[in-house]
C-alpha cells in the first residue's frame, strides 16, 4: 500500500471532522450515511483511484459515482483534502450560490463525476461509464457507492443484470450495508435478506467485508481488479454515523440538526 494504516486512520478522522464542521455550518444534514462511508473514500482517494486534481477532466481517469447522493458531504471532505477546491468552501454547504449542494452535482463541484440524489440511478450511470471505458480501452475503473435502503429501488437490479451481461469487469460497486434507511431498520421495512447472495445470484463477483477496516477494503478492491470478467460488488458492513459515538447506529442520524455543541462533541470523539 502507498500509506501505512496509521496514516490512513488519521486521514479518516480528518475527513470525519471536516464532515461534521461542514454539516454543522449549515445546522443540519445527512450525518449518518456520510460518516459510514468515510473509510472507503479514504482508501479510494489515497490508495486506489487514478485521478488528478490538477486535471479533473483527464480522459482516462477513474470515476466515482456516489449513487447515495445524500452522502455528498463525505465526498466533498475527500475532494477538498485532495485539493480539488479550497478548504474554506466547506462552510458554504447547501447555502445559496454554493458549489457544494447537499446532494452531488457534477455541474457544480470539481471532482464530482455524476449528479445523484434520486436514489437508484447511479449504478446505471456507472455501468454506462464502465462500458464506455471498455470501448475506449483506456484501463479506467468506475467505482459506485450504493446504499442498502437505496437497494430497494428496482433500477439497481436492472443495472445489475446489464453489468453482468456486458461483463463490466471495470465496474466496482460498494454496498454501504449500515442496516438503516430513512425511517428505520431495513429488517423491519423491506429487508435485503442476504445482499451478498442476491448479488451472487445476479452473477457478480461478490465479497463481504468490514466496511471500516481499511486494509480489508483495499484487499477487496485488489481482488475485484484481479477478477477480469465480472463486475464486482463489495458488500461493506458499516455503522451508520460511525465515529461520533452519540449517534452511531441510530435511525435519527440519517438527517439531523447539528448544533455547535454537537460539532464540539463529535470533534472530541474524532480527536
Ligand atoms: C428516489 C428517491 N426516493 C427517496 C429519496 C429520499 N431518501 C433520501 S436518503 C433515503 C434513505 C436511503 O437509505 P440508504 O440507502 O440506506 O442510505 P444510508 O443509510 O446510507 O444513508 C431516502 C428514502 C431519494 N433521495 N430518492
Ligand atoms: Mg442504509
Image (cartoon, rainbow, N blue to C red):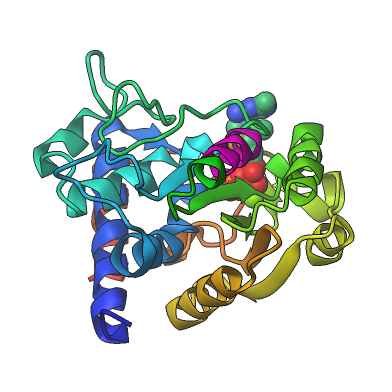
Q: Residue at x 58, y 66 (%)?
A: 238
x, y percent for residue 45: 32, 60
Give the camera-side residue of 146 and 261: 146
Give the camera-side residue of 100 and 83: 83
Q: Quarter holding the C terminus?
A: bottom left
Q: On the image, which quarter does residue 124 sit in?
A: top right
Q: On the image, which quarter does residue 187 sit in?
A: bottom right
Q: Residue at x 27, y 35 (%)?
A: 57
Report whether residue 265 is seen: no
Give the camera-side residue of 134 and 188: 134
x, y percent for residue 23: 32, 40
Report whether residue 102 is seen: yes
Q: Is residue 195 left or right of residue 140?
A: right
In the rendered image of this protein, does residue 117 appear above or below residue 193? above
Please state the quadrant of the image where ligand 1 appears.
top right
In reply to whether residue 129 is colored magenta, the answer given is yes
Magenta part of the protein: which range? 122-132
Q: Residue reaching furthest top?
A: 96
x, y percent for residue 157: 80, 42
Q: Residue at x 60, y 35 (%)?
A: 128
Give the camera-side residue of 11 and 29: 11
In the rendered image of this protein, does residue 9 appear above or below residue 123? below
Amino acid at each position: 500500500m502507498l500509506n501505512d494504516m496509521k496514516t490512513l486512520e488519521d486521514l479518516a478522522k480528518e475527513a470525519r471532522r471536516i464532515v461534521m464542521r461542514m454539516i454543522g455550518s449549515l445546522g443540519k444534514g445527512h450525518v449518518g450515511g456520510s460518516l459510514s462511508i468515510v473509510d472507503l473514500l479514504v482508501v479510494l482517494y489515497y490508495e486506489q483511484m487514478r485521478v488528478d486534481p490538477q486535471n479533473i477532466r483527464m480522459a482516462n481517469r477513474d470515476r466515482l459515482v456516489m449513487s447515495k447522493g445524500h452522502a455528498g458531504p463525505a465526498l466533498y471532505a475527500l475532494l477538498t483534502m485532495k485539493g480539488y477546491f479550497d478548504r474554506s468552501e466547506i462552510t458554504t454547504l447547501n447555502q445559496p450560490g454554493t458549489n457544494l449542494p447537499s446532494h452531488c452535482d457534477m455541474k457544480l463541484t470539481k471532482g464530482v463525476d455524476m449528479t445523484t440524489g434520486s436514489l437508484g440511478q447511479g449504478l446505471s450511470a456507472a455501468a454506462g461509464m464502465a462500458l464506455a471505458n471498455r470501448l475506449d480501452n483506456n484501463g479506467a475503473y468506475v467505482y459506485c457507492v450504493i446504499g442498502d435502503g437505496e437497494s430497494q429501488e428496482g433500477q439497481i437490479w436492472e443495472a445489475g443484470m446489464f453489468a453482468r451481461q456486458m461483463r463490466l469487469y471495470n465496474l466496482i460497486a460498494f454496498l454501504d450495508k449500515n442496516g438503516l434507511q430513512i425511517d428505520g431498520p431495513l429488517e423491519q421495512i423491506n429487508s435485503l435478506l442476504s445482499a451478498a447472495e442476491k448479488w451472487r445470484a445476479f452473477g457478480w463477483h461478490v465479497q463481504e467485508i468490514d466496511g471500516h477496516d481499511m486494509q480489508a477494503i483495499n484487499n477487496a478492491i485488489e481482488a475485484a481488479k484481479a477478477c477480469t470478467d465480472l463486475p464486482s460488488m463489495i458488500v461493506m458492513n458499516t455503522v451508520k454515523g460511525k465515529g461520533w459515538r452519540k449517534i452511531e447506529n441510530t435511525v435519527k442520524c440519517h438527517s439531523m440538526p447539528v448544533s455547535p455543541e454537537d460539532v464540539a462533541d463529535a470533534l472530541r470523539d474524532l480527536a
